[in-house]
Image: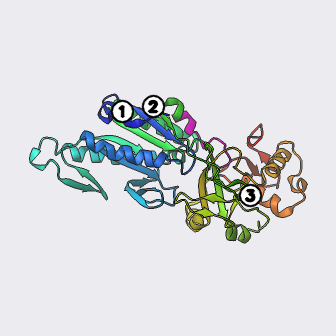
């Protein structure tokens, strides 16, 4: 595991280094990102952090451990990052030859910077949300290239895989492209067999629903999933694993509604659970094979839920024609 604290941030900026930090959800990647943003000040350098509007949990802040809010700007596209960063850099450059102002703070759109320090560090949290398609991936790689050419150290924190342990968008392209890659491997927080915390190295993200939310969705049959919260409190009998067909990224409105109904924690491959994965695979295989998916699993309610997931435009696995025929958008089953 690369320890970024071994690097001088000034040297990283002087060489325009591209740094990627990834882990399972709640695995320490965001904490590392914000630490690097703060550490830049010790090298006489200002930094600026950004996150995506698709993360409805955080607006104009990067939240660490549900309590610490690091100042950031929430944007809807990569172009906004570059535009904002250039404007901030230009404003701060004005003070570089005015030593009587050095050390004073200046507030630019809600984020404080130090006069006399150049802006040479850029950070992006939840970068995977900017890379859900080829266009977004191209824009992030373009931003990284621009930062490198401008001698800006750019940091990108994100999830390489979603809660199904499938590649999260095209974030892997950035991992392969980076100069420095740090993978965080936290301890699994699951409690197998209601005993003690598992604590094996965690490479998966477990998404949980509250039991009340599962029942409100007609999925009261989901089994309990117990875990240890990051505050070290045991959560017993209150949560269930989210079904495999839960949307990867819900709409902003839906995320706000579900904020208190859904939690994530790092899990090992043994503890992680994906209810209804086999059923989803069977329904999608029937679409690929040109057969009627409605009778595959003999459960109309589950079939409807799975088809809603598969045909959601944000997921892009299948589409329903005007004639009511389901058509696959993948030649192979990506879930197998």
Pointer 2 or 1: first along the chain: 1
Is residue 324 toward the left or the right of residue 311 in the image?
right
Query: Split into 4 quadrants, where in the image is the C terminus?
Result: top right
| Residue at mark 2 | 180
| Residue at mark 1 | 7
User: Residue at 61% of width from left, 52% of height from top?
Assistant: 189
- Is disc 1 surrounded by few (<14), some (14 to 19) or many (20+) residues within 10 Å? few
Residue 173 magenta-highlighted: yes
- Is disc 3 surrounded by few (<14), some (14 to 19) or many (20+) residues within 10 Å? some
- Viewer-closest of 139 and 198: 198
| Separation (CA) of disc 2 from disc 3 | 39 Å
Percent x, y of residue 4: 41, 36
- Is disc 2 surrounded by few (<14), some (14 to 19) or many (20+) residues within 10 Å? some
Q: Do residues under tags 3 and 1 come within 8 Å of each other at their CB atoms? A: no
Which mark's residue is nearer the viewer, 3 or 1?
A: 1
Percent x, y of residue 197: 63, 53
| Residue at mark 3 | 308
Q: Do residues under tags 2 and 1 come within 8 Å of each other at their CB atoms? A: yes
Pointer 3 or 1: first along the chain: 1
Write down the quadrant of residue 246 in the picture: bottom right
User: Residue at 40% of width from left, 48% of height from top?
Assistant: 34
Q: Which mark is residue 196?
A: none
Residue 79 visible in the snapshot: no
- Viewer-closest of 276 and 143: 276
Q: Secondary structure at mark 3?
A: helix
Is residue 164 toward the left or the right of residue 253 in the image?
right
Q: Which residues are magenta?
A: 161-174
Percent x, y of residue 152: 33, 35
Pointer 2 or 3: first along the chain: 2
């Amino acid at each position: 595991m690369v320890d970024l604290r071994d690097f001088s941030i000034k040297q990283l900026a002087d060489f325009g280094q591209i740094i990627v930090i990834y882990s399972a959800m709640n695995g320490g990647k965001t904490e590392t990102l914000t630490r690097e943003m703060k550490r830049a000040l010790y090298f006489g350098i200002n930094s600026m952090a950004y996150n995506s509007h698709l993360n409805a949990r955080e607006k104009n802040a990067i939240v660490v451990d549900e309590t610490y809010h690091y100042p950031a700007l929430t944007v809807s596209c990569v172009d906004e990052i570059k535009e904002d960063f250039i404007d901030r850099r230009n404003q701060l450059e004005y003070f570089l030859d005015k030593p009587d102002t050095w050390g004073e703070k200046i507030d630019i759109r809600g984020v404080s910077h130090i006069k006399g320090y150049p802006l040479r560090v850029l950070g992006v949290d939840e970068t995977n949300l900017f890379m859900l398609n080829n266009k977004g991936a191209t824009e992030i790689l373009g931003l990284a290239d621009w930062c490198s050419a401008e001698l800006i150290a750019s940091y990108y924190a994100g999830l390489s895989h979603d809660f199904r342990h499938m590649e999260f968008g095209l974030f892997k392209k950035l991992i392969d492209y980076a100069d420095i890659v740090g993978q965080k491997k936290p301890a699994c927080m699951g409690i197998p067999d209601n005993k003690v915390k598992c604590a094996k190295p965690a490479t998966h993200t477990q998404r949980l629903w509250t039991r009340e939310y599962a029942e409100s969705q007609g999925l009261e049959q989901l089994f309990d999933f117990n875990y240890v919260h990051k505050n070290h409190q045991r959560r017993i009998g209150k949560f269930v694993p989210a079904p495999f067909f839960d949307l990867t990224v819900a709409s902003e409105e839906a995320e706000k509604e579900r904020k208190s109904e859904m939690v994530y924690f790092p899990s090992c491959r043994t503890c992680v659970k994906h209810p209804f994965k086999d059923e989803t695979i069977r329904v999608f295989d029937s679409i690929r094979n040109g057969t009627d998916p409605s009778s595959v699993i003999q459960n109309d309610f589950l079939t409807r839920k799975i088809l809603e997931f598969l045909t959601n435009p944000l997921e892009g696995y299948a589409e329903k024609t005007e004639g009511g025929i389901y058509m696959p958008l993948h030649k192979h089953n990506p879930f197998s």
